[in-house]
């Protein structure tokens, strides 16, 4: 019935900083932009993989940090990677500070964490063939 995750969406405070993070640092492709009924910029679509996108909405406002108060809605984005140390080194080489250095999680997968310019948490995960995810 399902083919995969089509997209994840974020309201961003500074589109320029967000595009620098998602495109220049993470390497996703800025595919296209939609305008609203008033012909104003509305959503930027970034391609992750074939038919998988991140939507960035203009005009976000600073809100509650997910780490200081539990709120409904967004918790984090997880991106699967081939090599956890390669992505960690890449992020650091771009001047980012990891929230969590590469470590093995309870599910046997390797992970490291960083935040985008709006403070959204992003997990990078190297899937272990013995993990419950890989075996399910």
Image (spheres, rainbow, N blue to C red):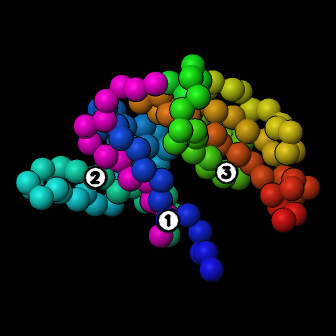
8, above or below 26, in the image: below
The magenta region covers: 51-64
Q: Residue at x 81, y 45 (%)?
A: 109
Label number found at residue 51: none
Query: Which label sits in the foreground, 2 or 3?
Result: 2
Q: Position of residue 67 (x, y in %)?
A: 59, 24
**Residue with the mark numbered 2:** 43
Quarter of the image for residue 4 reads bottom right
Q: Residue at x 62, y 80 (%)?
A: 1
Between 15 and 59, the one lying in front of the other is 59
Gap in Å between the C-alphas at discs 3 and 1? Answer: 18 Å
Q: Is residue 92 visible?
A: no
Q: Are marks 2 and 3 in contact (CB under 8 Å)?
A: no
**Residue with the mark numbered 3:** 81
Is residue 126 left or right of 136 when viewed as pictured?
left
Q: Residue at x 69, y 34 (%)?
A: 112
**Residue with the mark numbered 1:** 6
Gap in Å between the C-alphas at discs 1 and 2? Answer: 15 Å
Q: Position of residue 83 (x, y in %)?
A: 72, 47
Which residue appears farthest toward the bottom when viewing the image? 1
Which residue appears farthest toward the left when viewing the image? 38
Q: Is residue 62 magenta?
A: yes
Q: Position of residue 131 (x, y in %)?
A: 87, 53
Is residue 101 left or right of 75 when viewed as pictured?
right
* Among the two numbered marks 1 and 2 on one chain, the one whose residue lies closer to the N terminus: 1
């Amino acid at each position: 019935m399902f083919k995969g995750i089509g997209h994840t969406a974020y309201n961003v405070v500074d589109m320029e900083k967000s595009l620098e993070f998602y495109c220049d640092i993470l390497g996703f492709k800025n595919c296209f932009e939609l305008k609203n009924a008033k012909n104003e910029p509305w959503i930027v679509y970034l391609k992750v993989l074939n038919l998988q996108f991140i939507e960035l909405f203009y005009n976000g406002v600073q809100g509650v940090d997910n780490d200081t108060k539990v709120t409904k809605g967004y918790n984090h984005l997880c991106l699967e990677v081939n090599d956890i140390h390669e992505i960690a080194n890449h992020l650091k080489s771009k001047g980012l500070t990891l929230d969590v250095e590469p470590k093995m999680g309870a599910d046997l997968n390797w992970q490291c964490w960083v935040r985008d310019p709006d403070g959204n948490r992003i997990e990078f995960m190297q899937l272990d063939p013995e993990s419950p995810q890989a075996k399910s």
